[in-house]
Image (cartoon, rainbow, N blue to C red):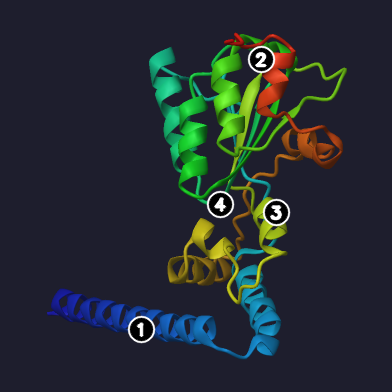
Amino acid sequence: MMPEIIISVCSLMGLCYSALVNLLSKLFGYFRIWTASSPRKSLRPYLYKIDLYVWQIIYGTPDTGHVVLFNGWHNGRTVVCDDCRLKRVGELIDQAKICLDVVLLSTANVQYLDRMLAAHNRGVNVRILASDKMLAANGPAMQLICALGVPVRGSPIGVKFGYNFAIIDSEKRALGLEATQDTVHTCLWRLRGNMKGCFRWILDVVKQKRDYRHDNYHYQIFFDEWDFLSPITPPYFAERHFVEVTR
């Protein structure tokens, strides 16, 4: 008898939990639809601040993104084969939603250029920092990327680094991008989820545990001088003889 009672109670609790999730999700959805269509522009900055404040209560400090090394695994994971690693790196680049910062200093492992262009075409904000050696070795492909509107800058003189890597969906970068936009909802919800994250946060509070993602400032520092670096444009490749000039 006792097991049946326990099963019934657990089943009832599950139904109540599902109903609560559905109700909160609908209310949250109605609020977002109303605020997005609200003609009162004077309220929009305040609505955005409220939305961002709720996100920060749930998730804490925005992180600096997930770093993927093209030449290896930065977290020491054991990879069964090179093909598995290359495939996984490509899959992670394809998952970028908001922003993608790429550093190309080596001429090796540049087979992801088409994936970077695909990310740009689906609306991801892509930036590429490349060395002259890399630009020379991949002139036609990089010239096409520049011509299609992907911002490319030359790496600062004196940088000593032998890896190519990507910073995927840095929340700090995403905040900087939306700072110039007229929006009432932060894009950070897209990177962590809505109500799913909220209930995970509640469970973490009960367990006295907060889950903060790793920061990668030592990778993001490569872009600290981005605004001071000269843009690489399509004519640059012909001037440096990185591509053949047809006459």
Asked if 86 appears above or below 180 in the picture, the reply is above
- Which secondary structure, mark 3? helix
The amino acid type of the residue labelled 2 equals: Met
What residue sits 65% from the left and 55% below the top?
174
Q: Where does label 1 land, which residue? A: 20
- Element at label 1: helix
Q: Nearer the viewer, mark 3 or mark 2?
A: 2
> Dot 2: what SS?
helix
The secondary element bearing badge 4 is classed as: loop
Residue 146 locus on image (x, y percent) = 62, 31
Return the mark for residue 98.
4
Marks 4 and 2, how far apart in space?
25 Å
Asked if marks 3 and 2 touch (Cβ < 8 Å), the reply is: no
Disc 1 residue type?
Leu
Residue 222 place in picture, x, y as percent: 78, 33
Task: State which mark lies toward you, 4 or 2.
Answer: 2
| Distance from the alpha carbon under mark 2 to that under mark 1 | 54 Å
- Residue at x-position 62% and y-position 49%: 213
Which badge, 2 or 1, comes first in the chain's sequence? 1
Res. 245 image quadrant: top right
Observer-nearest residue: 36 or 57? 36
Task: State the CA–CA distance, disc 1 to disc 3.
Answer: 32 Å
Q: Nearer the viewer, mark 2 or mark 1?
A: 2
Residue 216 figure quarter = top right
Which numbered disc, 1 or 4, marks the residue closer to the eye?
A: 4
Give the labeled residue for mark 2: 134
Confirm or deny contact between disc 1 and disc 3 (CB under 8 A).
no
Amino acid carrying label 4: it is Ile
